[in-house]
Amino acid sequence: MSDRTVLHVKGRVLVGPEDVRDELWVVDGRVSYDRPAGARDIRTVKGWALPGLVDAHCHVGLDRHGAVPQDVAEKQALTDRDAGTLLIRDAGSPSDTRWVDDREDLPKIIRAGRHIARTRRYIRNYAWEIEPEDLVAYVAQEARRGDGWVKLVGDWIDRDLGDLSACWPRGAVEAAIAEAHRLGARVTAHCFAEDSLQDLVEAGIDCIEHATGLTEDLIPLFAERGVAIVPTLVNIATFPQLADGGESRFPRWSAHMRRLHERRYDTVRGAYDAGIPVFVGTDAGGGLAHGLAAAEVAELVTAGIPPLDALAAGTWTARAWLGRPGLDEGAPADLVVYDEDPRADVRVLAAPRRVVLNGRVVG
């Protein structure tokens, strides 16, 4: 489609959960609700239109071994795009993906810099591995490198203990989060277990990834502080397999992982019921495939979140949380068109009819 071509989206345009319009126009790559004067070269797309899906925990440029070549990262981004994911919060990567910003055919990425982990307490080749006395300096470094986010590894297996445990002392995370906020960045942390959560939340953290260790006694604290969670349920589904693989060396850790998995839906529903913000994220790019945002929305519904709120967690509210527009007048035209109403059945999200990115039909 040339830059002069006008795109006309007809049917039902879901500007918001209850804000439904009959049509929108795309002119010079941007959304308009007014028919452009004198438009002649018009392409029409019909169906149910949503803002591009959001994957708020995704790793473009990463696989299970570390950073990948650019051509592999490109395929990952294209897989997400073709599945309707047009906005990604890259929750930590050793790969420099700034080149993506120059590609109008690839999803927009909000980066959290590189993971920051305790020495020998995370996946090899993923993170800066440091000790607590260096945490503030590395947080400042990644706050300057990222797009308004920093990613900590809040807990991981302690091989001497044989189980998950917190990675950082309270004073270190307080100072580090304060420094990130001073620099204008928000902070999130990988957390599977229970014992790191209170310190992180009371230290002022903005988000917790996975949050499988969220317990009834901690839920009020999260709700009071407005700390969001990104449950990554499609990734948590792998816990039993991970537990089986570690059974012989770390039986205590394996049993813990199984318990976290068994209560995963109750954990997410309890958080939602308490008013904790919940957002869609898949954890793609480690051991998990890309393009699973629709599956994660369906998992949130399985956990007991009402379908409309689960849909919002991967579209309207997620974009607002990340500070990016939806289908607003004048916004970049990033949208996905479906044959049926995704509010009635979120499984519709798995089969986009058309994908429009920066005003161009790309899929």
Image (cartoon, helix red, strand yellow):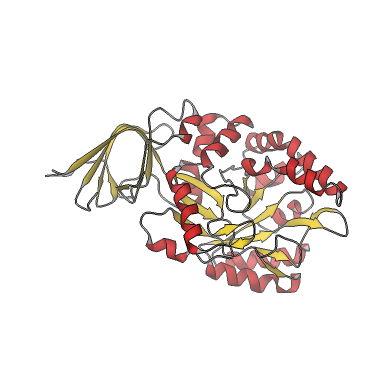
Q: Is residue 179 visible?
A: yes
Identity of the residue furthest to the left in this view:
38
Q: Image quarter for residue 141?
A: bottom right
Choose between 167 and 294: the one closer to the eye: 294
Q: Is residue 151 above or below residue 193?
A: below
Seen at 69% across and 46% down, the residue is 211
- Horizontally, residue 101 falls left or right of residue 114, namely left
What is the quadrant of residue 335 in the picture?
top left
From the image, which quarter does the C terminus lie in? Answer: top left
- Measured as percent of width and height from the top left, residue 10 is found at 28, 33
Residue 75 x/y as whole percent: 47, 54
Q: Is residue 313 visible?
A: no
**Residue sitting at 63 percent across and 50 percent down?**
287
Residue at image point 72% right, 60% down: 122
Q: Is residue 121 left or right of residue 183?
A: right
Please provide percent x and percent y for residue 305. Answer: 59, 32
Q: Is residue 139 above or below residue 248?
A: below
Q: How many marks?
A: 0
Front residue of this view, candidates 47 and 312: 47
Is 146 positioned to the left or the right of 263 in the image?
Answer: left
- Nearer to me, 29 or 15: 29
* Quarter of the view holding residue 46: top left
Q: Residue furthest top?
A: 344
